[in-house]
């Protein structure tokens, strides 16, 4: 008989930004290396239905799934740290819960009953977990609960999990609580009190954690372990230290392995699994920490001061760097500053220029000048989504001499709309509704750089954009030297542009950064870093 699906719920306490997402992702890595099939998902207590319309300042990157769902960036960690492929079912928010309850109420589904948080909202959450279970073959479903225990918003989710754990049987559920052990320098001590209190909060709701994962800057000694165990009602071996990693987030699974988090979970859930072989992972981490070579890449964007705005891009550069035994130093360049100073000051010594995705016209002129600088000076260029559109605009203006060429996103009355909306999109005005979102298939033409990189004629990539390369300009732009090397399989929309007599000049309308993994870097990123290294050594 097939085993029942096992559930791991990861909650957080004391403070936010604890690295709960990384803890969940790293546990996923370890369990997968034990031979288990893992799915990881996230419950976000905020009221937005999805993070698609939230500003990067609020939220960091919007991570796009294969099915087009716009989700929290933690799902990016899940997909990078494991082989799981998430779907829109795997990111539920309070906004979605309430939207569903109100829809049900309006359509008379509750048969005149008083509609309440319990059971109506909690039912929606539990039903979602069941739906995910039915649609997945995973042995283990790990669910991270966003926010901090004790927050009003999170209460509903925790209550739902409490009920759920009784319904599926407590032996099928493992609660992991991630907390912070602050270090008080003046006393030279680690403090366990906030952890005790946060666990007490969970117990108030009726959840007794099975394992406590303690974020700590210092080693956790046996006395503190015993203290946490006693106050939190767990065995001392179930208190796991999660130290600050020194070099890269990919060390996290190795760190959690030290206290055998994966074995504790596996034993707790009665899972048959093997000791993990982390050889390849370790090798990847070594390459990230101690590479032979080094390159400098400028990322020219408008949210460069935000650590998380281009998260997946930075991670993809790390993966590609490891492949070429190269440290990729990223300098984040403000496109606005290039508008003021010109590109030479900041870009003259870099080995590659990357322009990421973006919306709105702030900073676009600076990005256009950066693309021109890369094209004219033989600097490897990689434009992603908006970055591809920028490359097209620059080429149209400066090579094809189409004065005033731009995207209709920036100027509706431009004489040369080289980037524009396709007809069927023009009437859609609802926020988010007109975007081309998620995975679709494209054809890569032979005898192109793109084909050399992918080695395949058919590729599947994820999209998140409204505007497209305008086919009316295709012939003119292509005959001047900006070659179209890939188009969408269904409508022939332009997917990749490239300049062939340039060391590396590629623009992709899609987002390759959502499909790169540690030991499987995305081919365009890998090619870009290789070209940057060649430039540096030339
Ligand atoms: N703003 C552009 C568009 O909507 C590019 C979007 C992006 O870079 N993700 O087409």
Image: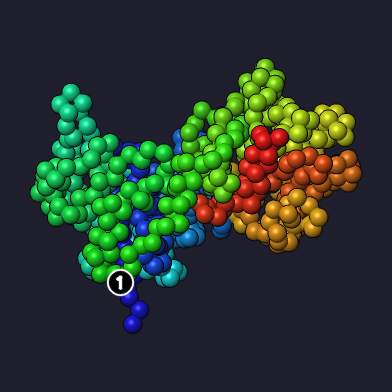
Residue 388 is situated, as x and y percent measured from the top left of the image, at: 71, 41
Q: Residue at x 38, y 67 (%)?
A: 36
**Residue under numbered circle 1:** 272
Q: Residue at x 18, y 23 (%)?
A: 186
- Is residue 156 in sight in this rendering? no
Q: In the displayed structure, would residue 16 be above or below residue 159?
A: above
Q: Residue at x 70, y 59 (%)?
A: 455
Residue 353 is situated, as x and y percent measured from the top left of the image, at: 66, 34
Q: Quadrant of residue 272?
A: bottom left
Q: Is residue 94 left or right of residue 305?
A: left
Q: Is residue 43 left or right of residue 114?
A: right
Q: In the displayed structure, would residue 90 be above or below residue 51?
A: below
Residue 212 is situated, as x and y percent measured from the top left of the image, at: 22, 50
Q: Nearer the viewer, residue 282 or 435?
A: 282
The chosen color scheme is rainbow
Residue 112 is situated, as x and y percent measured from the top left of the image, at: 34, 61
Task: Check disc 1 and report its element: helix, strand or loop.
Answer: loop
Q: Is residue 213 left or right of residue 56?
A: left
Q: Residue at x 86, y 33 (%)?
A: 399
């Amino acid at each position: 008989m097939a085993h029942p699906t096992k559930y791991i719920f990861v909650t957080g306490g004391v403070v936010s930004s604890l690295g709960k997402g990384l803890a969940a992702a790293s546990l996923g890595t370890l369990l997968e290396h034990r031979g288990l099939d893992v799915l990881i998902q996230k419950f976000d207590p905020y009221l937005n239905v999805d993070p698609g319309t939230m500003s990067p300042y609020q939220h960091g990157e919007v991570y796009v799934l294969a099915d087009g769902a716009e989700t929290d960036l933690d799902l990016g960690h899940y997909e990078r740290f494991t082989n799981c492929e998430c779907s829109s079912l795997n990111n539920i928010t309070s906004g979605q819960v309430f939207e569903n309850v109100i829809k049900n109420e309006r359509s008379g589904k509750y048969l005149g009953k008083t509609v309440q948080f319990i059971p109506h909202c909690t039912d929606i959450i539990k039903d979602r977990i069941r739906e995910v279970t039915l649609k997945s073959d995973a042995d283990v479903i790990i669910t991270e609960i966003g926010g901090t225990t004790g927050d009003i918003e999170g209460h509903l989710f925790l209550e739902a999990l409490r009920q759920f754990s009784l319904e599926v049987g407590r032996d099928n559920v493992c609660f992991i609580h991630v907390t912070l052990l602050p270090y008080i320098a003046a006393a030279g001590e680690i403090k366990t009190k906030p952890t005790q209190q946060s666990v007490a909060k969970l117990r108030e709701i009726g959840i007794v954690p099975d394992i406590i994962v303690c974020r700590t800057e210092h080693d956790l000694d046996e006395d503190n372990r015993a203290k946490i165990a006693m106050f939190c009602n767990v065995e001392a071996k179930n208190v796991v230290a999660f130290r600050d990693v020194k070099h890269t987030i990919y060390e996290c699974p190795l760190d959690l392995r030290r206290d055998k988090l994966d074995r504790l979970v596996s034993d707790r859930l009665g899972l048959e699994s093997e000791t993990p072989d982390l050889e390849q992972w370790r090798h990847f981490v070594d390459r990230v920490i101690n590479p032979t070579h080094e390159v400098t890449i400028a990322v020219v964007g408008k949210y460069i001061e935000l650590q998380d705005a281009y998260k997946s891009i930075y991670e993809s550069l790390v993966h590609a760097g490891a492949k070429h035994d190269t440290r990729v130093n990223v300098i984040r360049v403000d496109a606005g500053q290039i508008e003021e100073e010109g590109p030479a000051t900041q870009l003259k010594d870099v080995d590659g220029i990357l322009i990421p995705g973006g919306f709105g016209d702030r900073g676009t002129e600076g990005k256009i000048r950066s693309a021109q600088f890369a094209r004219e000076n033989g600097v490897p260029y990689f434009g992603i989504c908006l970055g591809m559109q920028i490359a097209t605009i620059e080429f149209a203006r400066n090579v094809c001499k189409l004065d005033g060429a731009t995207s209709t996103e920036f100027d509706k009355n431009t004489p040369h709309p080289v980037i524009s909306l396709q007809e069927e999109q023009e009437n859609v005005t609802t926020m988010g509704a007109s975007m081309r979102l998620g995975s679709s298939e494209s054809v890569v033409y032979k005898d192109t750089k793109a084909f050399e990189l992918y080695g395949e004629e058919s590729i599947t990539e994820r999209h998140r954009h409204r505007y497209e390369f305008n086919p009316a300009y295709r012939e003119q732009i292509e005959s001047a030297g900006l070659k179209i090397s890939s188009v969408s399989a269904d409508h022939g929309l332009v997917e990749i542009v490239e300049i062939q007599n340039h060391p590396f000049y590629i623009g992709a309308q899609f987002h390759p950064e959502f499909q790169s993994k540690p030991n499987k870097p995305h081919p365009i990123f890998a090619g870009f870093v290789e070209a940057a290294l060649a430039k540096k050594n030339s």
